[in-house]
Image: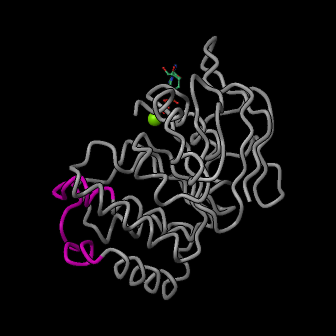
Amino acid sequence: MIEITNLDVRYGAIRAIKDVSLNVQQGELVTVLGANGAGKSTLMLTIAGALKAAGGKITFDGRDVTAATPEKMVRYGIAMVPETRDVFPDLTVVENLRLGAYLHRSDKAGVMADMEKVKDLFPRLREREIQAAGTLSGGEQQMLVIARALMSRPKVLLLDEPSLGLAPTVVDQIFEMIRELKATGITILLVEQNATKALQVADRAYVMQLGEVVVQGSAEEIAGSSDLSALYLGG
Ligand SMILES: Nc1ncnc2c1ncn2[C@@H]1O[C@H](COP(=O)(O)OP(=O)(O)O)[C@@H](O)[C@H]1O
Ligand SMILES: [Mg+2]
């Protein structure tokens, strides 16, 4: 579904992504692991069209999207949840969700139905639907940004460190929710520093270090390699 070949991304003179090749097949949950500064967010932002590649190619559903804008990528079916977890704090939960459905705003009945679906998936959001998003807890805001991304009806969801900075019990809830999302059939690319948790939900994994993919394999293989965890994942 997503095919990345020999991708290079730079910030001026800094090469943040070096010759990265990676693919995600339909219905898969693929995780990208790596320490701080490995280039994970840069990779996600480039797939989403927010950063331009300096070299290499990205295809989505067989179409060359290497130079596509973020708006185009959303239309094609890619939704990204950045690590910044931005909600519109003064808008209610429902209003935040409606903004995610911007592309489909003429289809009022469809948007209503999508809204019910995401509220079924996240009962906590239903309970708080008329509450200002800024008053939600960190975990609830994470749920809201994921739910808002789903309102664009994506084929692929890009999740950048959804567990970052959350308490352990909330982290468990977020990963349980990712497991439920995967069961709906949506394709997911998940960036995480929490390798143990990510490998429990993922089908395959890539490990990045200093802008390069250093290891790839099935989640099982990588979870079972203690060397790997010591070398690259701080385990
Ligand atoms: N806006 C930026 N300008 C310059 N360098 C950046 C910028 N964003 C990230 N970098 C650098 O690019 C590298 C990869 O960063 P990033 O993709 O955020 O890594 P990760 O998400 O894995 O922590 C790091 O060396 C980081 O300092
Ligand atoms: Mg990051």
x and y percentages locating residue 35 in the rendered image: 46, 30
Q: Which residues are magenta?
A: 123-142
Residue at point 75%, 43% (across, down): 4
State yes or no: residue 42 in magenta: no
User: How many badges with numbers are in the image?
Assistant: 0
Q: Is residue 67 left or right of residue 82?
A: right
Which of the 4 image quadrants contains residue 62? bottom right
Which quarter of the rendered picture does the N terminus lie within?
A: bottom right
User: Relative to 52, is 141 on the left or the right?
Assistant: left
Horizontal and vertical percent for residue 163?
34, 49
Front one among 29 and 131: 29
Rendering coords of residue 98 (x, y %)? 40, 70
Camera-side residue: 168 or 44? 168
Q: Is residue 51 above or below residue 37?
A: below
Q: Nearer the viewer, residue 234 or 208?
A: 234
Coloring basis for residues: one colour
| Residue visible at 64% across and 36% down in the picture | 215
Image-quadrant location for residue 78: bottom right
In this picture, is 155 found above or below 90?
below
Q: Residue at x 53, y 34 (%)?
A: 228
